[in-house]
Amino acid sequence: MKRIKKVMLTALTIIIISLIAVFSASALDVGTVSSLKTTPSNSAITLSWKKAANAKGYRIYEKVSGKWKAIKTTPSLSFKVENLKAGTKHTYAVKAYAKQNGETLWAKKYITI
């Protein structure tokens, strides 16, 4: 009986320490991408933006048939979209992310163009 109590007390202590670590660790605040601009060329467009606070990378989305589709994840501050047809409209969004404790944290907002 004493052994069971000791094992349970040890397990409870580990759980409490783990919960304290989880709740006391501050979540990293990932900033929103700013100054998104486009530079067109023949059948291509280059998207570029300023670094977001705490960002380790960015995910670029394209709106296709009314739905957002991820097209690239990159650590870069620009991305070239190629093979575009002249006279067509395209909508893009860029969202910043960071990594903390093995977890991907996303910016609360994204910017579109």
Image (cartoon, grey):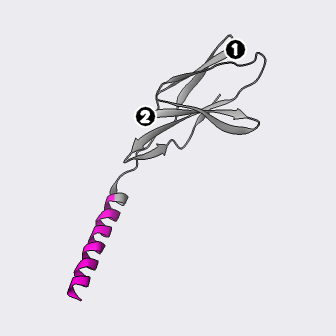
Residue 67 seen anywhere in this rendered image of the structure: yes
Image spot of residue 29 (x, y percent): 43, 43
Q: According to the image, label 1 marks what residue?
A: 43
- Residue 61 at what x, y percent from top left? 62, 33
Identity of the residue drawn at 41% across and 42% down: 99
**Real-space Cα separation, disc 2 to disc 1, in angstroms:** 29 Å
Image location (x, y in percent) of residue 1: 24, 89
Identify whether 76 is placed above or below 99: above
Residue furthest toward the top? 42
In the foreground, 91 or 44: 44
The residue wearing badge 2 is: 56
Mark whose residue sits in front, 2 or 1: 1
Q: What is the three-letter code of the residue carrying label 1?
A: Ser
**Magenta stretch: includes residue 24:** no
**Residue 31 visible in the current orientation:** no
Q: Earlier in the sequence, mark 2 or mark 1?
A: 1
Q: Secondary structure at mark 2?
A: loop
Prevailing SS of the magenta stretch: helix
Amino acid at pointer 2:
Lys
**The label number, if any, that marks residue 7 in the structure image:** none
Magenta-drawn stretch contains 13:
yes
Q: Which residues are drawn in magenta?
A: 1-21
User: Could you tell whether 49 is left or right of 54 in the image?
Assistant: right
